[in-house]
Amino acid sequence: MSDFIEAILLACGIPTVISAFLMYYIKGRMTQKWKQDMEDYKAKIQSSLDTKLEDYKSYIQRDLAINLRRDMYIKELAVRQLDAIQEMWSVFECASLSGRPGNMIRILGGKPEVDFEIVRQFLDSFNKAFSAKSGLYISKESRVKLYAFRDFIKEEVYPLAGKSKFISKSQVDSFKSLRRDARISLRKDVGSDDLTVSREEYGVH
């Protein structure tokens, strides 16, 4: 570019000294402009980088905040589910067949005898647990198993009140099978189904 300008000056008959001075001046101005352009370009690049960096920092902060809230929610949900399962597990305490007082069914002398007052208390406790907050945190699989056991007690056992205090062997077998399924499902909900389970838990006597 400077060579082209110098050729024009010489073609116009401008003396060499003046031409040299003009070229020095033009080159200086061009150098200054180039430097200024470079400074402006660097400033724009830096500004753009700063903006993008701030945007990225904001994105990371928002993402971390969202992840933190999600983790807190998951932990809170896990705690509530565990509380619900523990509450429902305690409702099943009277479903043991150990023969001790306080159970719905006691096998004494080979005969399965029903305590209908305990049965009524079980049904009340079961319904209250599900009507309260606990019902929100029980898994679908466990709800199906739990209600299958509850419905058996409600439809097959409790209607015998005032008629007979004994139930058949097949009813006892159904009781044990449905109770086992319900309790093992609760164990799966908390990840403890692989723990050693008592013989009574699986209905083995």
Image (spheres, rainbow, N blue to C red):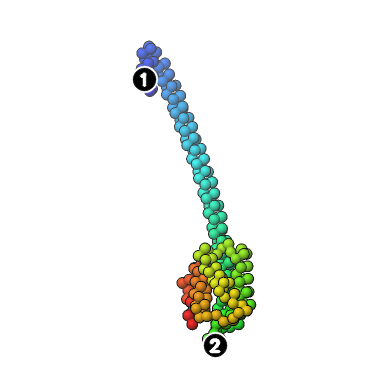
Q: Position of residue 155 (x, y in %)?
A: 57, 72
- Res 92 → quadrant: bottom right
Q: Position of residue 75 (x, y in %)?
A: 55, 61
**Up-down: is 62 above or below 196?**
above
The outermost residue toward the top is: 13
Res. 84 in view: yes
Amino acid identity at mark 2: Gly
Q: Residues within 10 Å of mark 1 (few under 14, many from 20)?
A: few
**Up-down: is 112 above or below 14?**
below
Q: Nearer the viewer, residue 166 or 54?
A: 166
Q: Residues within 10 Å of mark 2 (few under 14, many from 20)?
A: few
- Work out which quarter of the rendered image holds the N terminus and state it: top left
Identify the disc placed on residue 162: none
Query: Tag 1's secondary structure?
Result: helix
What residue sits right under mark 2 in the picture?
Answer: 109
Label total for image: 2
Q: Nearer the viewer, residue 110 or 190?
A: 110
What residue sits right under mark 1 in the picture?
Answer: 4
Q: Is residue 30 left or right of residue 126?
A: left
Q: Nearer the viewer, residue 111 or 128?
A: 111
Q: Is residue 25 left or right of residue 7?
A: right
Marks 1 and 2: which is nearer the front?
A: 2
**Up-down: is 202 above or below 5?**
below
> Tag 2 or tag 1, which sits nearer the N-term?
1
Question: For the residues marked 1 and 2, what is the alpha-carbon distance in whole angstroms?
Answer: 121 Å
Q: Position of residue 171 (x, y in %)?
A: 52, 77
At horizontal 41% and vertical 20% (from top left) the residue drawn is 23
At horizontal 43% and vertical 21% (from top left) the residue drawn is 26
